[in-house]
Amino acid sequence: DTYHSDIPTHVPKDKVPEDTSRRYPHEAPFRPTNPSKRGALKGCLGQFPEWVEDPAPPRQPRKRGDEEGPPAFKNGSASRVCNPQASVVTNLRNMRNERPSSFARPVL
């Protein structure tokens, strides 16, 4: 009633064909073979599993400084990279833009 769908408009509605398929009368509703396992009891075969104590013993902290191990890894490349490159920094045009007072002509 709200949308007045029974009143015809200028667009004709397509008629939906009747369902002529023959449906098989199954004896039970469909159940998937591998349903998703969600919730506490869905992934278990019985009730809640029995509580088992943690089999791993607690970890012992490592002693530092007593043992001499192999030397630390040293990377072969330089630790600091010069950026920007020296050729760009020492370019006369770039140096003039950076410090114009150093390149000003002396006033007589």
Image (cartoon, grey):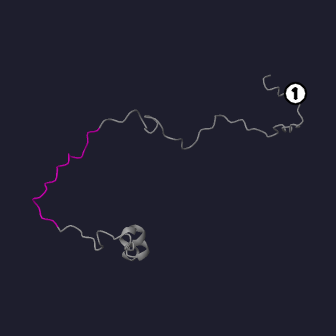
Residue 35 or residue 70, whichever sits in front: 70
The answer to whether residue 103 is above or below residue 49 is below
One can see residue 99 in this view = no
| Image spot of residue 72 (x, y percent) | 20, 67
Q: Is residue 102 magenta?
A: no
Please tell me whether the stretch drawn in magenta is mainly helix, strand or loop.
Answer: loop
The answer to which quarter of the image holds residue 32 is top right
Neighbor class of circle 1 (other Cα within 10 Å; few <14, some 14-19, many 20+) is few
Q: Which residue is at 24% across, 45% downward?
A: 55
Residue 39 image offset from top left, x and y in percent = 46, 35
Q: Is residue 50 above or below residue 61?
A: above
Q: Which residue occupies 11% across, 58% down?
A: 65
Camera-side residue: 9 or 61? Answer: 9
Looking at the rendering, the stretch of residues picked out in magenta corresponds to 52-69
Whether residue 27 appears in this view of the structure is: yes
- The N terminus - image quarter: top right
Left or right: where 36 falls relative to 51: right
Quarter of the image where the C terminus is located: bottom left
